[in-house]
Image (cartoon, rainbow, N blue to C red):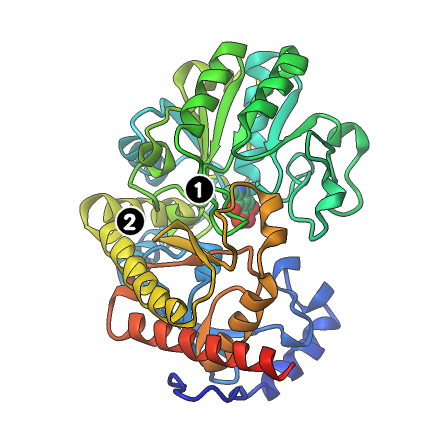
């Protein structure tokens, strides 16, 4: 499918996907393996990806702006990584013994994040944040963890507090936020160990530290608010938060699952010039293979292996470890991250042109490698601000983009993810023109009511 130049809403072929949805729904809840992929009868079933593009099983082709929610940093089916993984996996995949690939992967992680003393691999970002929290609790002997509203740290019980409600009232009073469990099945006792805070709000953070500091082991933070279009920290926010944590003897966990090896080779820690105590990595670490890790200062990580439980049959499996080795070598040795940033910037220039021509109030949020579009006059500084944006307009544009051959997440909270392969060919022009046509169509539909 090529970019349409009319504002009429094109129809995508869906016959095979509709049949697959019906079939899959008999066996998988929602017809998918993740709640986040279950889009009802609009659920997409993928055939393949190559570079920055993805094809569904009806043969529709899209510029992929989701990139699997961020991991595919180089591009789908990257031969450099895939060939290496294939070569290594022929030696055997799972031994519950340690291979040199694992050692090499962590050595590279440390080379790119020089403040990390020791790290261990996990299979998912969820496991990484779970273990990071446990290490922090073990090291400090304290139970509570502070987390920011709207931030997503995976699907374990401790992470699913005050994540992504649509109704901001459920988060409680702005001065006194409440912990809101996302879904049933999270024990109250677990939920009560998580203290909700508000991103970019240092006054509230200081108050929480003053009131409960002696029980607080750590604060976990996505350095940018990745699940609200990458809302950026206010100038000095991270520095002030780092100083506060030091004042109260609280550990700082940077959840770099989205930002790691993306914002800079050394992730958001390098980008913002912050040295956390612990960090979690996943996504870009393995170009889509299930590589993840948590690591930290030597002293903090010294609770392992004797004092804290960590394991995992698949932790450091050969597929993930070799994917991490090759991906991290490429990110270290090439200018891939510069290409990604420049590609994001080029798309942003094009989008600005289309939006400025309409005279709409908007903000581009995040980093060019991972950015969002918010329809609002004011710069958002925390999750609650998302509610006041015209997200209905964004959603209409996103749906229109799918129909025209580009696939952002159809939820205005999720940023667009750039990969190295988006820098090739006419991808930038395609995205800008598809965005412009979808914007026109969404605005015309509004006028028509
Ligand atoms: C910041 C952050 N932390 C943790 C996770 C969980 O990672 P995973 O989906 O690999 O379990 C995610 C996933 O999107 C994330 O964005």
The yes-or-no answer for disc 2 within 8 Å of ligand 1 is no
Q: Where is residue 73 in the image (x, y as percent from the top left)?
A: 35, 55
> How dense is the environment of label 1, judged by Cα within 10 Å: few (below 14), some, or many (20 and up)?
many
| Residue at position x 57%, y 23% in the image | 203
Single out the mark in the foreground, 1 or 2.
1
Secondary structure at badge 1 equals loop
State the mark number for residue 326.
Answer: 2
Locate residue 34: give its quadrant: bottom right
Secondary structure at badge 2 equals helix
| Residue hosting label 1 | 232
Gap in angstroms between the C-alphas marked 1 and 2:
30 Å
The yes-or-no answer for disc 1 within 8 Å of ligand 1 is no
| Residue at position x 32%, y 36% in the image | 271
| Residue at position x 72%, y 50% in the image | 167
Instruction: Please indicate whether residue 417 sits to the left or right of residue 446 in the image.
Output: left
Furthest residue toward front: 359
Near-viewer residue (269 or 399): 399
Near-viewer residue (310 or 55): 55
Q: Position of residue 316 (x, y in %)?
A: 44, 40
């Amino acid at each position: 499918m090529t970019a349409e130049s009319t504002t009429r809403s094109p129809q995508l072929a869906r016959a095979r996907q509709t049949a697959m949805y019906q079939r899959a729904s008999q066996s998988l809840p929602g017809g998918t393996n993740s709640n986040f992929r279950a889009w009802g009868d609009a659920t997409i079933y993928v055939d393949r990806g190559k570079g920055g593009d993805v094809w569904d099983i009806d043969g529709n082709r899209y510029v992929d702006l989701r990139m699997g929610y961020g991991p595919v940093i180089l591009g789908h089916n990257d031969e450099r990584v895939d060939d290496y993984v294939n070569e290594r996996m022929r030696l055997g995949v799972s031994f519950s013994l340690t291979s040199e690939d694992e050692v090499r992967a962590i050595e590279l992680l440390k080379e790119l994040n020089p403040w990390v003393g020791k790290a261990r691999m996990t299979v998912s970002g969820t496991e990484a944040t779970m273990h990071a929290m446990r290490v922090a609790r073990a090291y400090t002997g304290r139970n509570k963890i502070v987390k920011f509203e709207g931030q997503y740290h995976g699907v374990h019980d401790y992470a699913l507090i005050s994540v992504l409600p649509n109704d901001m009232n459920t988060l409680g009073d702005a001065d006194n936020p409440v912990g809101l469990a996302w879904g049933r099945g999270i024990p109250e006792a677990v939920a009560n160990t998580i203290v909700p805070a508000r991103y970019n709000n240092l006054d509230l953070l200081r108050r929480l530290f003053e009131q409960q500091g002696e029980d607080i082991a750590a604060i976990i933070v996505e350095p940018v608010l990745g699940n609200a279009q990458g809302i950026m920290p206010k100038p000095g926010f991270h520095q002030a938060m780092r100083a506060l944590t030091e004042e109260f003897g609280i550990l700082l966990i940077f959840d770099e699952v989205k930002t790691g090896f993306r914002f800079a080779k050394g992730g958001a820690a390098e980008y913002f010039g912050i040295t956390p105590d612990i960090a979690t990595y996943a996504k870009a670490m393995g170009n889509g293979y299930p590589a993840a890790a948590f690591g930290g200062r030597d002293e903090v990580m010294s609770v392992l292996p004797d004092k804290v439980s960590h394991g995992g049959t698949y932790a450091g499996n050969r597929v993930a470890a070799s994917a991490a080795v090759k991906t991290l070598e490429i990110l270290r040795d090439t200018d891939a991250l510069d290409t990604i940033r420049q590609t994001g910037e080029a798309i942003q220039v094009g989008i600005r042109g289309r939006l400025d021509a309409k005279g709409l109030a908007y903000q581009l949020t995040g980093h060019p490698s991972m950015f969002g579009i918010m329809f609002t006059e004011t710069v958002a500084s925390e999750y609650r601000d998302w509610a006041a944006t015209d997200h209905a307009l964004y959603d209409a544009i996103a749906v229109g983009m799918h129909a025209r051959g580009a696939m952002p997440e159809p939820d205005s909270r999720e940023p667009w993810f750039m990969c190295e392969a988006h820098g090739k060919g006419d991808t930038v022009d395609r995205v800008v023109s598809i965005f412009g046509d979808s914007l026109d169509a969404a605005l015309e539909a509004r006028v028509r009511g």
